[in-house]
Image: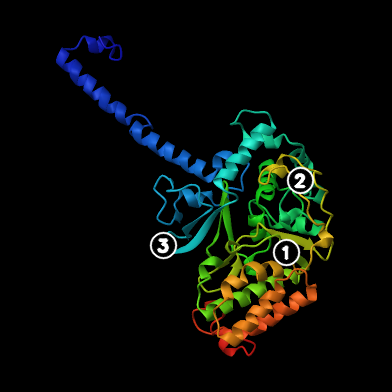
Amino acid sequence: MDPQLGPEAAALHPGWQALLLLVVSVLSCFSSPASSPPSLVSRVRTSYNLGRTFLGLDKCNACIGTSICKKFFKEEIRFDNSLASDLELASDYLPSYSANYSDDSKTWRPVEIFRLVSKEQNEISDRRICAFASAPKTCSIERILRKTGRFQKWLQAKRLTPDLVQGLPSPFLRCPSQRLLDRVVRRYAEVADAGSIFMDHFTDRDKLRLLYTLAVNAHPIFLQIFPGAEGWPLPKYLGSCGRFFVSTSTRPLQEFYGAPPDEAADLAYQLLGVLESLRSNDLNYFFYFTHVDAAMFGIFSNGHLFIRDASALGVIDKQEGSQAAPRAGENQDIFSCLVSGCQAQLLPSCDNIPDKQSVVLVCQQLLPQLLQGKFPSPVQVEIDSALAQCGQGIRPDSEVFGAASRLKDILRPLRTCDPRFAYHYPDCKYNDRF
């Protein structure tokens, strides 16, 4: 006798018993919420977990944020030719991915999805955190970071002050002012209620995410606090999910090294203009690059040049003054070692960073690649001479800036006013200064 049928069913004719068994088995298929085949449920769960792991959500709240996660899982952000339905990518070691973004699932626009650091560096950092706590190779990253002395100070803090970020390796935080840190808190986009300089509306989770982002790579913070909509030369920040953030799409500058002369002249002219705005602006912040490469600058589809990667940008507050950077080894903890290791670095003081630094770096390393051998002999000679002078760091600031200004004057008439440069067309037709 089948114990599931009971004594009444056992008394039935064997044929009726067989029929009753069939009915019971059919009804059982429809009687529970888990009516989907077990293999399908398992497959859906697995794909979702794989997506969480790829995005770094399994490491939150030691991550950037979650403000754009819904768009990933609703497939309103789609990776170009790489994203399968289960969020599995062809290569998960790329530093960035081209993608398409939609607000209505009908119209799409190109975006870029960036890691804060490489996948390999993330893995090294996570192992370093576990080792810091004498934990096994795999551990709860968040739990260990929460127990650190620095984060405990953050938990008690009502306002983000310079002492809370001292020792973090980002150039952005080497010389912080209170005015700059207030701007970070007031404009931090990963919290529900921004606008105040006080962190009363920050949860413990929000504080850990902000601290982790500042410790690993301040680039997404730059995009939030100096938005392109206000005239800053930065792409638009669209949100974060796990250890990725999304911004508007640009093509890196190195793709334009072979550009025709008029386009090369236009991009070089814009680049010099960007450096001027970083040195002199209405908010009285001085921005400087610690190093440069062509991937740090990008060009939108309309020809407009922007800073594609601000991770090597430092900031000095000329209005309020900056708190002096700590001496090598001071205020260092696990947050100081997530990216660069714990080796003490000898860096110049905030007062010893020359105004000309970014111009010298760009004239040495980027503009020659863009401009050499592009123009007729008399003009090319003038360009090469100006490049040589503005790229000599031993020259006084005034001579470097004079050479950069002369280079801009040479480049200005070499640009063309046509629809290829949509960022200034047709306005350039009516601008005497163009």
Left or right of residue 235, residue 81 in this image: left
Amino acid of disc 1: Tyr
Residue visible at 50% across and 72% down in the picture: 258
When the figure is inspected, residue 94 is found, relative to residue 134, above or below; the finding is below
Q: Which colour scheme is used?
A: rainbow
Where is residue 84? Give x, y as percent: 39, 48
Which numbered disc, 2 or 1, marks the residue that appears first in the sequence?
Answer: 1
> Would you identify the image quadrant in which residue 298 lies?
bottom right
- Tag in front: 3 or 1: 1
Which residue appears at 34% of the width and 29% of the height? 31
Q: Residue 288 carries which label?
A: 1
Please say if the residues under marks 3 and 2 sit with CB atoms less than 8 Å apart. no
Q: Are marks 2 and 1 in contact (CB under 8 Å)?
A: no
Q: Where in the figure is residue 341, as x and y percent of width and height? A: 69, 43
Q: Is residue 423 above or below residue 164?
A: below
Q: Mark 2 sits on what residue?
A: 344
